[in-house]
Amino acid sequence: MLSTILTKSFSKDTALLILRVITGTVLIHHGFEKLANIENFADAFVRPLHIPFPIFFSYVAAFSEIGGSWLLILGLATRFGALAIVGTISVAIYHALVTSGFNIFLLELLLLYFASATSIALTGPGDFSIDEVIIRVLRSESNDENVQESVKTKTDTGKLTSKEDLTKKGGIFQFLQANLLSDTSN
């Protein structure tokens, strides 16, 4: 039991869970504050940057913070949620630099959100996430299909085809598993 708790994987996955949940929980209220008075937010933060369609982009910022936070908390499409937050926080950092210069008191919270979301986007959600459950289900389905196809191919042709030939027949689920949902190389 103790060796399981002290392993790198368990510690890393627990740290990612804590980082995801706390970042999402603390950041979500910023999105709701924007929605509470979208005109005020647009006047104070979007229009000074001369971004076109300030009300529309104010809604984009609010919903990316709310949606991205929920995705982080749940661990569902985690990298997508983290990238939404990184985009919004990047604009907020730019706004702070343009309007106030390098004011560490304005930048420190933004930089912490940026670092947290970027770390999650780069490392993935960890094992304690819905993404990981989806990947495990897809992986088991893929393995079942490969076994069934190899048995069928072996009985039909008398020889076993390579694994590479079978994976070329993949599909959207294998693409998601390999590229988008999580870091499967660990």
Image (cartoon, helix red, strand yellow):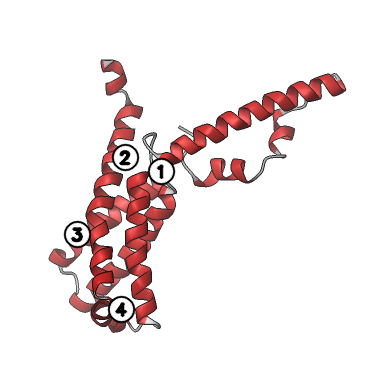
Lower sequence index among marks 4 and 3: 4
Task: Specify the amino acid type for callout 3.
Answer: Leu
Is label 1 in a helix, a strand or a loop?
loop
- Under mark 2, the amino acid is Leu
Q: Quadrant of the rendered structure where residue 152 is?
A: top right
Give the distance between the C-alpha atoms of the residues marked 4 and 1, in whole angstroms.
Answer: 30 Å
Say whether residue 108 is left or right of residue 75: left
Q: Residue 68's x, y, as percent?
A: 36, 56
Q: Which residue is at a point 24% across and 71% down the rendered structure image?
A: 36
- Tag 2, which secondary structure? helix
Residue type (three-letter) at the residue carrying disc 4: Val
Q: Report the Cα–Cα distance between label 3 and label 1.
A: 22 Å
For marks 3 and 1, the one nearer the N-term is 3
Q: Nearer the viewer, mark 4 or mark 3?
A: 4
- Which label is found at residue 109? 3
- Around disc 2, counting alpha carbons within 10 Å, would you say few (fewer than 14), some (14 to 19), or many (20 or more)? many
Quadrant housing the C terminus: top left
Compared with 48, 86 (above or below) is above
The residue identified by callout 1 is 124
Q: Which residue is mark 2?
A: 16
Q: Residue 90: percent from the left, percent from the top?
A: 32, 65
Q: What's the residue type where badge 1 is placed?
A: Gly
- Which image quadrant is residue 44 in? bottom left
According to the picture, the residue beneath numbered tag 4 turns out to be: 46
Work out whether mark 4 precedes mark 1 in sequence or the reverse, and give the earlier one.
4
